[in-house]
Image (cartoon, helix red, strand yellow):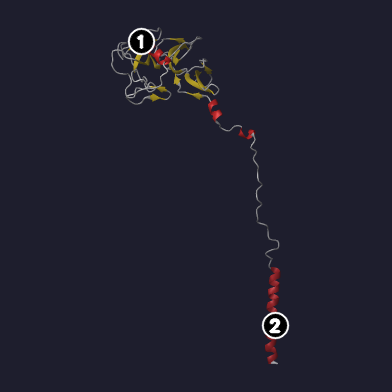
Amino acid sequence: MKRFLSLLLPLLLTGLLACSSTEKAAQTPSNEVDRPDTRQEAPETVSVSSDESSDEGLLSVELLWEMERFGSPVISPDGKWIVAPLTRYTVDDDKSHTDLWLFSPDGSVERPLTRHGSADGQPVFSPDSRKLAFITRREGDEQAQLYVMPLDQPGEAVRLVTVPTGVSAPKWVGGHIYFISRVWPGKTWGEMEAELEKQRASHISARIWNQLPYSHWDHWIDEERQAHLFRVPAVSGGYEDLFRARERSACAGSDLLSRCRIEAITEPTGREL
C-alpha cells in the first residue's frame, strides 16, 4: 500500500501542475491577439508641378534689375524736406536713369522733382531750404553740370555754370556754391575743351600710367589732371578757381574724383575759407 501511494503521489502532483499551467495560459492574453497596431502609415507622396506658374514670385536676375534703388538722402536745414536720388534700370538698352524725389518726414509727400531720365544726383539744399542744387547732364551737356531749382514755387531747373571739365561734390554755404572739378593746371578753358574734344575723337585705346590707381569703376584716371576747388555765387554764374595759384590738387592721396568731396566750409569774412 505504501508503495502504491509512493507511485501515485508524483502522478497527482504532475497532473495538478499541468492543470495550473493550462489555466494560467488561458488567462494570459496571446501576443498575437488583440494587440494594438503600433505601426505608422507612410505619408502620402506630394508631387510638385514644374510648370511656369510655380516660378512666380521667385527672386530672379530680371526681378533684381527691375527693382528701383535709393541713393543717399539729404535733409533740408529746416528739417521739413528730404531729397533722395532714385535709380531705375532698363534692361533693353542696358542703361540707368536717376531722378530726384522729394519726401516729407511724416510720409505725406512723395513726388519726383526731376523726370529727365538722366543721372540727376548729389543734391544740396540752400541755407534757407527754398532751393535745391544738384549735378546732372541735360541736353547739350558734354559733362555733368551744376543746376539749381526752386522748391517753394513752380519752376524748372536752371544751369548755373558750364564747366568744360564737369562738376562734382557741390556744397552750398552762405551765398556761394562750392564744387570740385578735375582740370589741367596751367591751361585755359579753351585749351581744356580742345583737349577733351581730342580725347573723344581719338581711336587710340593704349594708355600709360606712372602711378596707381589708374582707373576707378568704369572710367580711367588722367594723371595730368588735378581736382580743384571752385565757387560760384548762387544767383549768378561767375565761378572762380580757388586753387589756381596752387600747384597741388585739392584732394590728397589717390586723387579720385569719387572720393574727393567737400566736408566743411566756413566763410567768416567772405575772404577766407
User: Can residue 86 be seen in the rendering of this structure?
Assistant: yes
User: Can residue 239 be seen in the rendering of this structure?
Assistant: no
For residue 9, the mark is none
Residue at 71 percent of width and 76 percent of height:
19
Residue at 70 percent of width and 80 percent of height:
15
Residue at 67 percent of width and 84 percent of height:
10
> Which corner quadrant of the image does residue 31 belong to?
bottom right
Type of amino acid at the residue the image marks with label 2:
Leu
Circle 1 SS class: helix
Q: Which of disc 2 and disc 1 is earlier in sequence?
A: 2
Type of amino acid at the residue the image marks with label 1:
Glu
Instruction: Specify the quadrant that holds the C terminus.
Output: top left
Q: Which residue is mark 1?
A: 191
Q: Residues within 10 Å of mark 1 (few under 14, many from 20)?
A: few
Q: CA distance from mark 1 to mark 2?
A: 136 Å
* Coordinates of residue 222 in the picture (x, y in percent): 36, 20
Horizontal arrangement in the rendering, residue 150 relative to residue 57 (left or right): left
> Which corner quadrant of the image does residue 196 belong to?
top left
Residue at 65 percent of width and 35 percent of height:
51
Nearest to the observer: residue 134 or residue 257: 257
* Coordinates of residue 206 in the picture (x, y in percent): 39, 22
Are discs 1 and 2 less than 8 Å apart at CB?
Answer: no
Nearest to the observer: residue 86 or residue 3: 86
Q: Which residue is mark 2?
A: 12
Instruction: Specify the quadrant that holds the N terminus.
Output: bottom right
